[in-house]
Image (cartoon, rainbow, N blue to C red):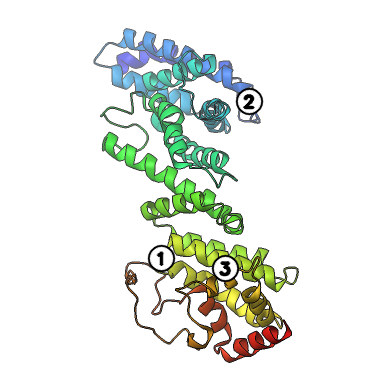
Amino acid sequence: MCRFYTMDSTHAKRAALLFWRSCGLTNATSYNNKFANSIICATDGACTSLKTLLAATGAKNASLARNYFAALIFAHTPNDFTACIENLLESSLMESHALFSYAGGDIILQDCNSSRCMFISFWKNMHELDWCHFFNAAVLKVFYRGIDCCVFGLCSAKYDSPMLNMLNRWKESVLLPWLEVVEGRNCRHKGNRQFLDSRGIDSLWCLVNLVVDESYVRARVKELYDIIADFPESICAVTELRNALSRTQQHQLLAHSLRLTLQRRLLHSGANSSQIIDVYISAIKVLRILDPDDSLLDVVACPIRMYLQSREDTVRCIVTNLTDQDSGELYEQLHKTTAPRLDCINDSDDEHSEPGGDWVPRSKKSPLTKRRSMGDILSMLISIYGSKEVFVNEYRYMLADK
């Protein structure tokens, strides 16, 4: 220990001082992108200095020399150094993502890209210096934030074409190559991980797939109002969202987010009753695809029903929809062979009818499950007032006017 200190501490201190001078960073420095190249060059120099230090100390003292050198380097770390490392990680990921998006998802990234080569060299030096563990939090932050940003960018406003296959190609072409560099190995083969844990590649694949699926669900939840408004043209997005939800179980997030969005964007004086009813009908159809048990619908529908009940023209708008042969969705619903007659509709949602041949029991595992199940769309609208008589009378009046 003493021999190591007397012979090599001077060289290590000089190398540490040179590292920060090469970075151009001080505690008073504000973060700037121009420091990225300086940090890459400084890390390369630190790796060379460490090799010299290890050669002088010998194999027995290699671990001591490595830890001592790291301690000297990070004893006086500038405040923005971690932010610079985050920027290096994020810039590399987003650059690969931009190439993927520009090529329409068909690009296979090559290592010949100059900035990618610099990133590979930089992170290889980080592994050589054994500094990776100092930046676990930065890697994880960029990992989650980058996936959210990229997935939303790929899927936003694209409701009529499959996106999950595109996301699988994105994982293969962008995310996994980036992870291979950060991990210092090939993520497609088994081995120990650096920044996540050491349980092997299977858990890494599971994590990547789950995080991407969760990001996809969040991206669709942000736009679910528009997806509902575009239904049935958005059926592809609805189907893929159902499949992703089955894996992530984010039903509660979706239900409460949509409920708040509907209250903000739909349930106000600027929206007419006919518009509210149309969106409500589409919401019923979409939510029953996402969750046939109606658990989502139970949560989302409550404020819409209460708001419609407070409007004076709700009954007339529903009846108008029932009698509009050209564009009335309720008219089509009423004249289907399987639709109930108006005089046969239950007065209350609490009344239970006999289950049909396609009846499926409500799952007991859903955190949103309630005791009852709602009836068909027409029954739900008429039951807003708890009685069918008001609707039947209005329906007769409008038929008489025709």
Q: Residues within 10 Å of mark 1 (few under 14, many from 20)?
A: some
Q: Tag 1 or tag 3, which sits nearer the N-term?
A: 3
Q: Look at the numbered discs 3 and 1 and tell me whether their residues touch, using CB distance below 8 Å.
A: no
Q: Residues within 10 Å of mark 3 (few under 14, many from 20)?
A: some
Residue at image x 53%, y 76%? Answer: 378
**Residue 292, percent from left and from top:** 40, 65
CA separation in Å, label 1 and label 2: 50 Å
Under circle 1, the secondary element is loop
Under circle 3, the secondary element is helix
**Residue 11, percent from left and from top:** 43, 11
Q: Is residue 261 above or below residue 345?
A: above
Q: Is residue 170 above or below residue 215?
A: above
Mark 2: which amino acid? Asn
Q: Nearer the viewer, residue 171 or 324?
A: 324
Q: Nearer the viewer, residue 93 or 118?
A: 93
Tag of residue 387? none
Mark 1: which amino acid? Pro
Q: Is residue 121 above or below residue 226?
A: above
Tag of residue 292? 1
Q: Nearer the viewer, residue 236 or 209?
A: 236
Q: Is residue 20 left or right of residue 207?
A: right
Locate the N terminus by quadrant.
top left
Residue 80, quarter of picture: top right
Tag of residue 33? 2
Mark 3: which amino acid? Ile
